[in-house]
Image (tube, rainbow, N blue to C red):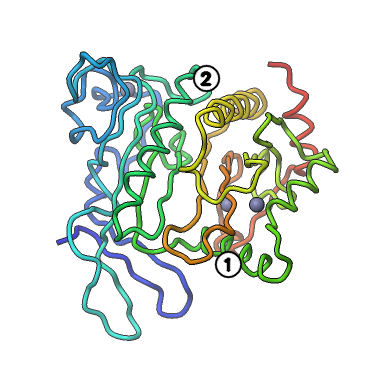
Amino acid sequence: MAISELRKDPVVDRWVIIATERSKRPHANRTRTESGRDEPCPFCAGREGDTPPEVLAYRDPSAPADTPGWRVRVVPNKYPALDSMGDISLPTDSAYVALSGVGAHEVIIESPKHCLSMAELAEGQIEDVLRAYRERLIVLQNDRRWKSILIYKNQGSAAGATLEHVHSQLLAMSIVPREIDHEWRALVSHHDMTNSCLYCEMLDRERSDGRRIVLESAAFIGFCPFASRFPFEIWLMPKEHSPMFDSVANDELRQLAFMLRQSLQRLAGIVDAPLNYVLHSAPLKEAKRDHYHWHLEILPRISKIAGFELASGYYINTVAPESAALQLRELAL
Ligand SMILES: [Zn+2]
Ligand SMILES: [Zn+2]
Ligand SMILES: [Zn+2]
């Protein structure tokens, strides 16, 4: 039996994960200063026994699994929001729809050292992290229960991190989350009308305008989107149309590591705020999934989500993306 439950709001298309096990996390629901470490960190090298056994690690080949000698390590979340045992269906009535909380919830530990920020990692280390994302996406896609796989980072307690050691998370779900679904439906309907990709058009427009561009490589563009929700929000997007992150080539992984590290360092140079990033990749099962265009959204959390955002579902951004891009672009590193 799954330990959590997915419930759909009876009126609007909004799912909630009821996951009571997660309240047992060591620091959940407790305030604590980020630097005040009061117990050994389970993500540091040497503490491998404190996590569930690894599902992937890049390590010295002579070192056995779940021992030190790794560069990046992926483990199941000890307090999962969703777990991979069990069946999806749950008896429900027509108004109150619920699914059992089946999913895969993994943690990507991005360094054996106790770093607090991804911007501190070397480019090759970030490349390993991105390669681990690709590898787990390829493996988990084969499980027919999953309709979408989210990869995201919470950095800093104000951005939702309960452990400060640099890490990101992966959640494979039996539904397509609303954010992905919104984007995907808009891209499909635009494609049906015009036979072109709205994100590809957006990139053309950003490149000819130039004011919102932060950085660029041969294969990627980093820009502050026209309707940025947060000050200094940056999106990294492949220039060539590409629906799924798992098809990213090795050379592109290297470029993306450069782009991501540069973006994080530039952000740290200006705001040094807690942040989230989310990897948006096509839903796994939809027929027109090729109309999606994957990207990474970096969301610095300078402003808090408050009453207005909760009441409206909209955001108030106090820094124009044109000014944010100019500052980010011109910062000397
Ligand atoms: Zn640590
Ligand atoms: Zn496209
Ligand atoms: Zn997106």
Amino acid carrying mark 2 in the image: Glu
Disc 1 packing (10 Å; few <14; some 14–19; many ≥20): some
Q: Which mark is residue 185?
A: 1
Residue indicated by mark 2: 123
Q: Earlier in the sequence, mark 1 or mark 2?
A: 2
Q: Mark 1 to mark 2: distance in Å? A: 35 Å
What residue appears at the point 29 percent right and 50 percent down from the top-left corner?
A: 104
Residue located farthest toward the bottom when viewing the structure as drawn: 94
Determine whether the residue tagged by mark 1 lies in a helix, strand or loop. helix
Q: Nearer the viewer, residue 207 or 324?
A: 207
Could you tell whether 151 is left or right of 319 in the image? left
Q: Tell me residue 46's x, y (percent).
A: 22, 17
Mark 2 Cβ inside 8 Å of ligand 1: no
What residue appears at the point 43 percent right and 42 percent down from the top-left corner?
A: 160
Within the displayed image, which quadrant is ligand 1 positioned in?
top left
Q: Tell me residue 191's x, y (percent).
A: 67, 65
Mark 1 Cβ inside 8 Å of ligand 3: no
Residue located farthest toward the right when viewing the structure as drawn: 209
Q: Which mark is residue 297?
A: none
In terms of image quadrants, where is residue 230? top right
Q: Is residue 178 above or below residue 58?
A: below
Circles 1 and 2 in contact, beta carbons < 8 Å: no
Q: Nearer the viewer, residue 68 or 57?
A: 57
Q: Is residue 38 above or below residue 197?
A: above
Image quadrant where one finds the N terminus? bottom left
